[in-house]
Image (tube, helix red, strand yellow):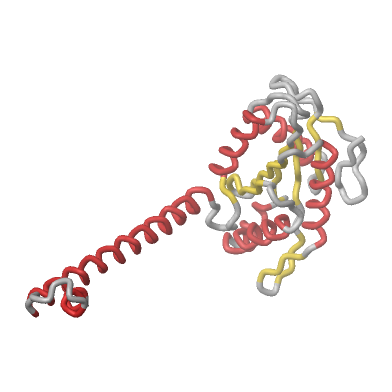
Amino acid sequence: AGGNMLIITGLRPNLQLYQAASIDLLVFLFAAIIWNFGFLICTVDRLQTEIEQLANEDELTGIANRRMFMNRLTEICKKREGVNFSMLLFDLDRFKAINDKHGHAAGDAALKYAAAVIKKQLRPGDVFARLGGDEFGLLLPTTTVAEATAIAKRIVSAVKATTFSWGSLELGLTVSIGIASSKGSMISPETLMESADCALYETKRRGRDGYSLFAAPLEPASNIVRLGDFSSTGSAART
């Protein structure tokens, strides 16, 4: 078409047909190269997005994985001096018993179910991740201790209120949660994780199905957890 246009418009009236055909072929090849280059760029972008997703997403539950969680935690610990942020660590109670009694497929389904229930209790911007096994982490930017406690209470109640169905079985699920907060001070990711883990251990020690808050100040050498009495549901009530 390009060669014929040169003849028709009078730009190259003496152009031979074979020359016009050669020009048409070159135009076609050039257009094909441009199209393929654009397709290649789109394909590379898509593959890069998929690779990033695989690197940051838990394959089983579809939420963030430990790598992404720790990266975000490190970022927020560096940048959030003077701003409150909190973290929750929690386990699915008696998860090993589900695996042992009903099989690993049932255990995987229980993890996916619990993750879906918990996601419904979260806010935009919260970072929810599976850290490994039945352990989950929740990073709460610009969140006070009181707000983090309210979210933990909401999660405990939501999981307990639902029933997980597996075949003909209906299983009740509960979670144990440990809460730690920066209280506006600079803190390392390791210290915050350790503090939340101490609070989680205390919840388990008190009977599971609840939440515990690590006491302030958050110091690496401290392992104090202040708790009130447990309610009838087993949840720890903070004073």
Residue occupying the point 90% across, 41% down: 237
Q: From the viewer's perspective, is 68 left or right of 239?
A: left
Image quarter for residue 142?
top right
Of all residues, the one furthest to the top in this rendering is 221
Name the one closer to the observer, 217 or 109.
217
Q: From the viewer's perspective, is 30 left or right of 131?
A: left
Name the one closer to the observer, 7 or 180.
7
Residue 157 screen position, x and y as percent = 83, 54
Residue 133 screen position, x and y as percent = 59, 48
Residue occupying the point 77% across, 57% down: 159
**Rendered-image quadrant of the C terminus:** top right
Residue 132 screen position, x and y as percent = 58, 46
Residue 45 screen position, x and y as percent = 41, 56
For residue 52, above or below residue 217: below
Residue occupying the point 74% across, 64% down: 171
Image quarter for residue 184?
top right
Q: From the viewer's perspective, is 198 left or right of 104?
A: right
